[in-house]
Every structure is written in structure tokens, then in C-alpha cells.
Amino acid sequence: MIRSKFLKLTELRIPNVSAGVFTNRVILFFILSLTAIETRSQQKNAQVVGQCFQVLTNVIIHDITSPLVASRDYAYSMIAFYEAARYADTNYMSYAGQLNGLKPLPLPTGGLVYDWQTAGTAAFYKTSYAFVFSKDIFQKDWDSLQVQLKKRAVPKEVYSRSVAFGEQIAAHILAWAKEDNYIHTRTLPRFTPSKTPGTWQQTAPDYMEAIEPYWNQIRTMVLVKPDEIAIPLPAAYKSEKFMAECKEVFETKKKLSKDQDWSANFWDCNPFATRTVGHLMYSIKKVSPGGHWLGIAGIITSKTKQPLVPSLATCSLVSVALFDAFIACWDIKYKTNYIRPVTAIQQLIDPGWEAVLQTPPFPEYPSGHSVISMASAVVLTNIYGDNFAYIDYSEKPYGVNSRSFHSFYDAAGEAAMSRLYGGIHFREAIENGSALGKKVGELVVTRVKLKKGK
Amino acid sequence: MQLFMRILSVLVLFISLNAVGQQPLFTLLPAQQTGIKFQNSITESPTQNVLAYEYFYNGGGVAVGDLNNDGLPDIVFTSNMDQPKVYFNKGHLSFEDVTSKTKIKASGWKTGVTMADVNADGWLDIYICRSGNGEEADRRNLLYINQQNGSFKEMGAQYGVDDKGHSTQAVFFDYDNDGDLDLFVLNHSTKRYRNFDVAWMKSSRDSLAGDKLFRNDKGHFTDVSAEAGIIGNPICFGLGVAVADFNRDGWPDMYVSNDYDEDDYLYINQHDGTFKESLSSYMGHTSKFSMGCDAADINNDAMTDLLTLDMLPEDNRRQKLLKGPDGYDYFQMLLRNGYYYQYMRNMLHLATKNGDQVSFSEIGQMAGISNTDWSWSALFGDYDLDGWQDLFITNGYMRDYTNLDYLKYILPDEMKKARAEGRDPDLYGLVKQMPSSDVKNYLYRNTGKLSFENMSQQWGMDLASLSHGAAYADLDNDGDLDLIVNNTNKPAFIWQNHAEDLKNNFLKIRLKGSDQNTFGVGGKVIVSAADGFQQLQELELTHGFQSSMEPCLFFGLGKRSTVTVQVFWQNGKTQIITGQGVNQTIVLDQKNATDDIKKEKPAPALFTEIITEKPLFTHVEDEYNDFKREPLLPHQFSKNGPALATGDVNGDGKNDFFAGGAKGQPGSIFINEGNGKFTEQIPTVFAEQTLFEAVDAVFADLDHDGDLDLYVVSGGNEANFQDHIYWNDGLGNFSFKPDVLPPTLSSGGAVVAFDFDGDGDLDIFRAGQVTTGAYPVAPSSYLFENDKGIFKDVTPAWLKNIGMISSAAVADINKDGVSDLIIAGEYMPVTILYGQGKAPYFSATAVKTIPQSTGWWNCVKIEDIDGDGDLDIIAGNHGLNSQMRPTVGQPVTIDAADIDNNGSMDAIISYYIQGKSYPMPSRDELIDQAPSIKIKFPTYKAYADATIKDIFTEEQLKKAIHLEAEEFRSGIFINDKGNFQFMPFSNEAQLFPVRSIVVADYNHDGAKDILLAGNNYAVRAQSGRYDAGKGLLLLQKKETGFSAAVNTGFYANKDARKIIAIDNFIIVGNNNDKIQIFKVN
């Protein structure tokens, strides 16, 4: 892998010099060693993506940020990171003009030396900081990371120039983000559950208010409009099909295998699950589903030893897919306003029934996990190929063991099914949700080209 | 000289010794003196802790009674983990630990203790309840039968009372009126169910969680719970029980306090061996996490009232640490699932009568006793012997696990850390880190005016502790009530009462029953005096929390030296003793009660409600929730109908009326057929215009053709605020013409029709109530000049946005021949706009705002109430029965600005708690309104002490809308030569928001009386419904002023909005309910 990359680099960097062969060889050697150093440091650089991601994720989790708001934080931060650092590899292009409303970004000044990792992390920091709530915690963690990052020898002048450039990029991204309607959606009336039978009702154990009923008003990045992709409507309440689906969820729990239970837990990704022991209520926080897939993206780039820019390209593109997938999914969720299995089963089969997982507070159809997992899988498959086996250890910090998968589609498929095992989704929501996610992913890889050439 | 000095020093000594208030009422007795060295020691361990058994911190109990029949009350303490202790009273406040002599030994987890003479041998026996997470054998309750020689024999199984449930407390009483004592055991669940299906849950039975009723059948107790109608489901968390004859029919009823979601129960004795759970017929709402409770007559009206305790802290910081979101939808869901209205605060249910039906008005907030933190025992007793029952409340929590920072941040962080370190999370270790706070118990003095004054400090009770079970008793036989408190991890408190220093009189009454009920449990006594004093007490032994009292009734009499005593026995017999002397103990023997109890004849009612098969008009609200749009609103503005107006529409000489509906409901005209009969007509135009929400209306001859037209104001909080005029053809047929009125763009509040331009036709003032979506920005109000049936907007700029007006009235208040306009509303002073008679008809310089009168006014009525020839202003306000009780120096305020620059107004109300102004919203509510504020307050702790200055920046505050309200009491502004002196009504009129007022001389004594109705159900889930109002008549007596009449028959107990009077009928318009019609007798 390194070899081929190295060859590519040398192709680009060495002009057609009609000097002597000896001189060529010297120059070649010199440049080889430079690029070798460059390559090695780019390998190490790729770690920084995961490290930055973790800092942001930690505070996202601490603040009990909803998966949607998290997807927004991730996307803008990752795009900023990418845009500021991509100059380390001239094969990579800007998102400008490819994402809705993103105008061309400030350019680095030609002829000057920049440290692209520094620029990238500065852009990431500035963008994330604007979004997170517990800024003091974020700052603290970031400062610790900086101590590590500063160990790289970057000349002072280069450093400040790079930071300044990163901050310019961040400012541009933040200005772009400001127009995505998020602020406006904070002022809209809160959701009122309907009284019509078959519609979504608040669910045990916390009966939380429905979150983000207006997420479909957030400006999409790639989709032309939130409902660009249509999926069939779910089965009518109490229809034969509906009853069969209820029964399926009910029976599945009854006969739940250990592995199914395990996978439900693996893919739970509940940012705020509450537990009660007597009077004492406590909560368990895990990374959101979007965060999980970004974690997977990180694992893949690490496994394939991607240098900085390709790593960023992967992660940011996955975050773009997640961003749009959530919007498309939420659009249909609130349009269909569908009942959750726990509500339906308690009404129709067993009044004491409880789901294995805690039902998240929003309507059922389609399954968010299914949509966003498949969208991410499409992007990853497009870059790394199908049947790419890997071990997902991203959930370890949240007390969940690793699991191996044969392919991204496998993982997405299991993520989708896990919601049925967990008792929080009907089959339709999973199948049609996966179809929706697939289409979102395909639109993303079709409409966005980050790498020149193929 | 020496003699002089001696006399002087003796005088000084004498004076200082007699200075009342120098020695506090209670002094704490040291263990060296009493010999009582008991404490409820709780030792946490990894297996024994609150995670394993959730009531681990509930504490122990106290029972008091004369166990050795030596005339002195003895004490039994239960310890959760250790052995109970029995102390015999040796006299002079000295006690002997006789536990080993008694042979009382109890393993397992002990909870409540109660005494009763179970085997009817004249000696008190002891029943100890057990719970905990141990074995069943260690959990069965224990009955120790008094062997009459200082020892006791445990015979629970033989008697059949060794219930295996998780028991909190028990009460012995004669429910089936057969002369022996039956047993009710209060149990609790140990599993939290976080799922609802009420029908399924509520109807299932759980033998360990469900309460039990045992019938005494000749000395053996049989479990009759199911057939007696006792609920025993798995979500019962019984923590308190009070037995009293709540509905005054001679049979004992029961109130059960349930923690968590399960409703409290009010079991009404059906006289046939069964009980009917009837809570919703008697009370409007209850405590949520109901704990201890107590029943007593707190307002000396010979009716038993009830207090239940909950967990609401008094101070702002603790409130902010445990309050989450408002939870409106969740609350609605609970209601839909069959749960009742429950709110987290102490509830004082004041018994009131309507005819011979009893119902309760909840007045805890007005009474000043609603916030006492995590509270356990409530014990009413006349501690200062002045004739009013005072209140002692114990509180405390060993670990504050309600702290939301723990739930959301601290505990998950530990989880995270544990995972990172590869170990199991140490939940138990974390629980142990939670702060343990000793908090001060509360001692309140009853003011006699439906309120209590916190005397903890003055009366010497200013000690912090973790206190749970408690009892009062006359330990030193000096006639006043001493207090015994069971503390956790601290020695028990024995408080000696020095009320004898106050030189008030007392009467102690013991009852001697004839049958197997030797101590006369269930007997009721009313002590009365010539000056009108009366007080009812019922003899039941279990009071407060996990505790029981000695079988004696303690009456404080103030300075009265002769009283009348009437005892009512459960067998229907009564005895009256007149000329009873005081400062003694008397024993009333049931044998001596030979008269039958006669049913009271209520005084003839002044009003009679006319009940028809089908209600004449039912106001139906549309589904709109203001809080969805403006989450910080204190109450909804979309629930202000119905509109009511009266006038003779068909010219037949009889006044008809109009009722205006909410959005989606047409209004109706009701033609008066005479004799209280009304016929409904819905004009076609009304049926066509149902987009509008009618909130006020007036009949007026607007086209000057001799008949009454109708002006209807549109309000609500959505849209469609255009008012309408309906033209009368003289026969009562109404039509509509568009474009006669200018646009009325604001949500309307009120309308008055009067000739302000002096041209002989009627003009209009139309008040604006609220700006939709931008509370509290002042909405538009309008002055419309009538120009031959077309109205012109002549509103001067200064009047246009004068305030959030809820009511307007017209009168020539300054007697200059020109009509004046009187208005009032939310955050507005009562304002008089003096009519000028000529354009511009009103002037900014001819406006009087009555000083110190800013309030949340709902209605104004102009009357010469005192008959002195000038017009006074009667005004209905929010009242005092809420968390907010502003004064001039400590107003309720509101600041509104767009904090987070997202285009929506953030309006934050603040009010004073313990002398400092704090914002009303919880952290979650504030973040919901302005998400970016989460950055300022990343934890609950960070927000716990925040004031408005911490939420708004200095610059935002300067530019914000700032309004104040200094007065919430309803009352009369008495006109004194143009100056208005405020005379607030007595507390009976402050316990609900007054929405409407009518005035007439209802008792025909020549003095005008005031009839009031109100309430407000359309409030935040956390505020709780204001539903204490049941209609009120204030009778005026020339010499003594206004007093609240009782049992008048004017039972306006719904969410009343408007009252109108037609002929001799009073019609009350209720929101989302039927109208009520009362005949004035």
C-alpha cells in the first residue's frame, strides 16, 4: 500500500527533468526520503483524526446531545478539518460547490509553508467549540490533546500561519452552518402527541417529549430536498400486516437468542438510557449511532493506514451521509408519526410487555439506525470495497465488547435488525429504512467527488 | 435604699421571669435527664443499602401510650436495623429502658409501630410492622400482647395479623362498627414499574405490596381486603394512613398516602363492611410522593381536614437541583391512563360543606406549609394551647438521590470511569458519596386565618437532623403536648413543652368504650364555648408517619375557663356536658351517652343549584396547548372562555343571555321563558363563525334602534382575533355585517360599551389580553367610536399598548358627569382613565394608577360597596394559594428579551423565595426555551443559585421588558375622596384566583354582599391546578365588615370564568364544562 502511494507521489512531484541520470537518481533519492518522511508522518497524522473525534464525542456524550444535533456537530467539524488539511494531498478537492450552499473557501497563500495537520486541527477545534455546550470540558480535553500534538516539531511561524488558516476555514464553515435553519428550529412549537390510534405516543420508562420534530427543515448537504427519496408508507394501524409485525416483535423477544440480545446491545447507541434501582435513578450514556459509524470509519482508516487527508476524506464523507440520512429519516418519521412496538403491543397483546432496549423518544418509521447505518455503509464500501472485513471495537469505551463483521453491508444489516431484536422497531421500518439509507448513500457518493481522477 | 434596691431587683427578676418569649416554647431534654438513649442507627453495607431496599432511609417510628397503666405515657421506638426500645415513664420526665423486661425482640427491618388494646383487656398492646428485603419470616408483622406485668407476648400468628407484606404502618379502628377493633395494614411495593397500563396494573393484586384490611371476628382477624374494596396492586407504595370520618356520616373513613405514581386513596366507608375509593369525588388533586399524613380540624369549623406531606424543598437551591422539565405531556398521559392530578408538594385539604356533602379545597400554599423538603411526620396539635391546632413536621434525607446532577452527570461519569478501568461501576460507593443533609424540622403556629407561621426558631426547634417517625404526648402531665422524635443516626429528641408558661387553658379527654373497643377509638368530641369557639377532634391513634399517639384528646382553649363538651360515639349515641371546667383530664364513658346523634340540619341555603337532565350549555375547549409554543408561560391564554352576557334580546321584558364558545363551538342565545326556564337558540351566523374563541361579550344597542345588539370579543392564543357585532332585528334574531369594526388584531380580554364621545350612541372599549407568541409584550387595546353603526378606531397611541388587560368596567367614578374607564390585568395596576367628554375623550394626563396595585388581576367591578355615596372598585386577583406571594418589597417580576437571538422572546418570571428573587423555570425548562443557555449552566448546580442577572447579560436586562406585580390578593379599593385604599379580602377569598364578581344584598340585611367564583385549571403541570375555589359569598355586616359565609349553596366548584345575574338566578360560566345555574332563595 505504502509503496504504491509512494510511487504515485513520486510521479506527481518529480517533473520531467532532463538532467543527468545520476542527478535524477540523487534527486529521486532525496525526494524519496522526503516523501518517505512525509508519508510516515502522514501515517502518524491519521491518528489525530481519531483523537480529535474522541474529544468531540466525549463532550457530546456528556451533554446528552441528541443523535441529530450530534450529527450536525460532527459533520461541520469534520468538513472543516478536511477543508483545512486537504492541501497535504493535492489529489483531494474541496466540498465547495458540491454541498448545498457551500461557497468556495479561503485559500492558503501560495508559496508559503503550512503544516496541514495544524491547520486541520485548528479548524476542527474552532468549529466544534462553537457547537458544544460544556465548553469547559471540551477545552480541558482539547488542551490535553494539544500537549500531545505539539510534540511534533513545527516551526513557530508555520504553526501560527497554519492555525490562522484553520480558523479562517472554521469561520467560513460556521457561517455556512448558520444558514442551515438550526437556529430557527429551536423556536418552533414543541411536539404534541396525537390522539389518533396508531400514532406515536410517549414511551416508557421516561416518557420523554418527542425530539426534533422539525429536523427536516435543516438544510441538507447533498439531497436536493429532505423528501427527495420516497419509501412506501408503513402498514395501516391494526391491519393484518400491522398485527403480524406486532406479533413478530413480541415473539422475537420471547425467543430471543443470546447473540440477538448481544447485537441489540451492541447497536443500542442510546445517548441516555436510564436505570432505576429503587428510588435511585441513574443513566448510562453511550455514543450516538452517528458517532458509532464515525468510530467505524476511524477504525477502517486506521486499519488501512490511511494518511491524514484520505482519513479525513473518509470520515467527513461519512459524516455528510449521516447528516443527510438523519434529515431524510426524520422527515418521514414525523410525517408518518407512527406508533412504537411497545405502545402497540401493550395495547393489543400484553399490557405488561417491555422492550429489551429503551425506546428512543421519537416516532417509529423508518428506523433511524437502519437509514444511517446503510448510508454510512454505502460510503465506506465505495471507498474501501465490499467484503471488507473488520473488527468493530469502537464501543469498548461504553462497556460493549468488540464484534467482527464481514463487510460494511453486513454491519449495517445487523444494525438494522438489532432494532427488532431490541423490540423498538417493526420489520418494515428496518427494511424500508435500509432502502432509504442505501439511496442516500448512493446520492452522496454520486454527487460528491473528493478525489481527482477516478 | 437597700430595701428599695432589693425590691427593685426582685421586680426585675420577676419581670424577666415572666417575659413570655424569652424561654422558647420547647426545650430539648438531654439524655442524662430523660434516660432515653435511643437512636435509629443505619449502617450501610454493600448488601444492605438503598439499592438493595429502596426504603432504606425511611427511618423508624414512635408509639406512645400508658403500657403499665400507671397513669403515665410510655414510649416505644422502632429501629430499622436494631432492636426496638421500650421506655417506661417514671414521672418528672425520667424514663427507664425496660426493653428486656418486656421481652420484646424483633429481627428484620422494623418500620411503623402502633398501640391498641387488641384483646380488650384494658391494657395497650403493641403492633410492630416489618419490611425490608430479607426473608418472609423476618418480615411478618408482630403483635405483642400486654401481659399486664410489664412483659409482652408475641402472638401475631395466633391473632392472624402477622401479615407478610412489606409493611409501613398499621392502624386499629372499628370500621364495621361492631364494637371491636379491626386492623388496616399499610404496605408498599419494592419494585418500581415504569410502564403503564393502569387498568391492568390497578386491578391486579399483590400480597406483598397491597394494603390489607383485617376484620376482627371475636378476637381472630380475617383478611377481607378484596371483598371490602381495598386496593392491593403491585404499585402501592403506602407511606401514610389517616383514619377519620371525612364525610361526617358517623362511620370512619381512611386516607392512604401513596408514594410515586399510584394515586392516594380516600376510602369512604359504605356502612356495609366495604369501602369505596372516592378520591376524585372529594379532592381536586393530591401530593405526588405522598408520605406521612394527618387529619385534624385546623380552622375550628368542626370538620376534619387533612394534610399530606411530600418532598418539595423550601429553598430555591434544593428546588433547582431536583426539578426537571415541566412534563406537561407526560402529566396528560398519566391522566389519560387513569391517574389523578398529583403534584409534588404538601397538600392541606380543607373540608368544606355543600348541603351535607363534604368536599375539600386544597390550601397548602396559602397556608404557608407546602414546602418543607423531604417530609415524613405531620402532627397537628395545639402546642401553644391557644385554641388553634398547630403543626409539627419532621423531615430529612440521608442521601440526596433526587439531585439531577447525579442522574445525568456524576453517576454516568463513574460508569465511564469504571469501564475505562475495566471494573464494575461502584454504584454503592457513589451512593455513599451523596451528601447526607440534616435539615431542620418545621414547627408551625396556626394563625387562625387558614395560615401557619413558621415558629421553628422562636419555639426552640431550630436543630438540624434526619427525623422520621414522631409523636406528641403529655409526658409530664402538665396539660401540654411534648414531642418525641425518632432520628436516624442521632439520638432521639425529647422536647419538653412549656406552654404552661403561656397561661393558656387545656382540657384532656379520654374515652372509655363499652365493648371490645376499650379506649373508645373512633369517638369524636366537639368542644365549644360561648364565644363561638368550637373544635372537633376524632380519637384515632395512628398519626403522622409510622407512629401512634396515646389514647387521649388534647384541647387547647386559650383563656376560656368554661366549655361545652359533646362526644359522638360510633354506636350513634351522644352525650353533652355543659359548664365543663378546664385544666383537667376527664374520662367520658360510652355508657353515659344515651341520646341519639341527630343529623345536623344545615342552615337554609341562600342558593340552590338548578340541576337539569341535560345541561343548558357546555363550553367545550379546543385542543390547543399554549405551552408548546411558549414553554415558559405561567398559564394558558387559550382557556379564557366562555363569554357570558345578559340582556333582553327579544324585548319581552325578561333578561336573556348569550354564552360564547371556544374555537370550534358556536355561541348560543338563551331566551328567558320565565321561572328559570331558558330556551336555546343558535343563530345561523354563530354556527358559521366558529373559528373564533369568545372570551367576553356585551349586549348594547349599538345601532341605536331600540334593541340590544351583541358585541363578542375574540380571544385565545392562536389566531383569529377579529371581534364581531351581531345586529338584533328587535325580535331576537341576529345577523352579521362585515366591515363595521376596524381590525382587532390582538387576542381580546374584555369589552365595555359606553358613550365616551357624548353623542348619544354607545361606543366601545375593547381590551387586549395577550400578544400571541410574545408574552408579556402588551397587546393592542382599542377605543372604537360609534359613527352610525360603523366604528372608527380612535385609540390614542398611549392607550394602545397600555397592558395585558383582563377586565374593564365603566362608571362615573369621579362624579363629574362623564363616564370613566377602569381597567386591570396582568402586571398592571388598577387603572382609572377619566373620561374627558370631548376628543380625544381620554388623556394620558388624566389617568390614575392606584399605587402599589400591580397584580395579576382577573376582574373588576365598580360598586358603592360601603354605601357612602361614592364608587369603590372590587377587584379579583390571582390570590395567595400559589408558590408566589408577592408583596410591595418582594414583587413577582418578569423579564423578557431574546436571549439567544433566535427570534423568539424568552420571558422569565422571578419571584421571592426566602427573601431573594429567583427565576421560576427549572434548568431543563430554561434550556428548552433557550438551548444556548446550556453553555452558561452546564450542570444543575451551576444554575441552582442563579438569579435573573445570571441569565440575562447586563445589556439584555437593560433592553428587556420588565414588569412587576406587587399584589396578588383580591379585595376592594375603597374610594376615599378619590384616593383608593386597598382592603384585601380575608383568606377564604385568597385561596383561589377570583375570575368574576357580582354584588347584591343576598341576605337582605341592607348591606351589599359580594359573590365570587374563579379557579384556573389551564396552568403548567408543575404549578398544579388552582381548583380550591368552590364559589364564595362574602357577607357584609355594617359593623364588622365582610366575612365568608359557609354552606350557602353557591357551589361554583369548577373552572369558573364569568358570573352573570338574571332575575333571581346566578349563572356561572365554566371553562370546558357545563354552565351552572343557581337560584337565589
Image: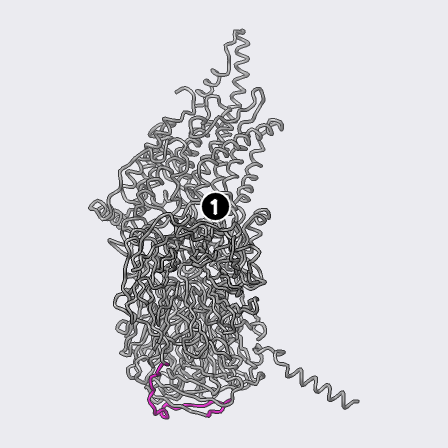
Q: Give x and y (percent) for residue B1008.
A: 45, 74
Q: Give x and y (percent) for residue B914.
A: 56, 63
Q: How many labels sit on residues?
A: 1
* Residue B613: quarter of image: bottom left
Q: Give x and y (percent) for residue A98.
A: 42, 27
Q: Is residue B760 above or below residue B15?
A: above
Residue A255 visible in the shown view: yes
In the picture provided, is B624 more to the left or to the right than B981? left
Looking at the picture, tell me which residue is in the foreground, B669 or B1045: B669
- Helix or strand or loop: what does disc 1 sit on? loop
How was this image coloured? one colour
Q: Quadrant of the C terminus of chain A?
A: top left
Q: Residue furthest left?
A: A240
Looking at the picture, tell me which residue is in the foreground, B981 or B327: B981
Amino acid under disc 1? Ser
* Residue B564: quarter of image: bottom left
In the picture provided, is A37 more to the left or to the right than A277? right
* Residue shown at 41% from the left, 42% from the top: A67
Q: Is B592 contained in the magenta span?
A: yes
Q: Quadrant of the N terminus of chain A?
A: top left
Q: Is residue B278 above or below residue A326?
A: below
Q: Which residue is mark 1?
A: B904
Q: Is B1068 contained in the magenta span?
A: no
Q: Is residue B884 above or below residue A51?
A: below
Query: Which region shows up in magenta?
Result: B579-603
Circle 1 residues within 10 Å: few <14, some 14–19, many ≥20:
many
Identify the subunit bearing mark 1.
B
Looking at the picture, tell me which residue is in the foreground, B814 or B268: B814
Q: Give x and y (percent) for residue A19.
A: 54, 7
Q: Residue furthest right?
A: B1
Residue B196 visible in the shown view: no
Q: Is residue A409 above or below residue B636?
A: above
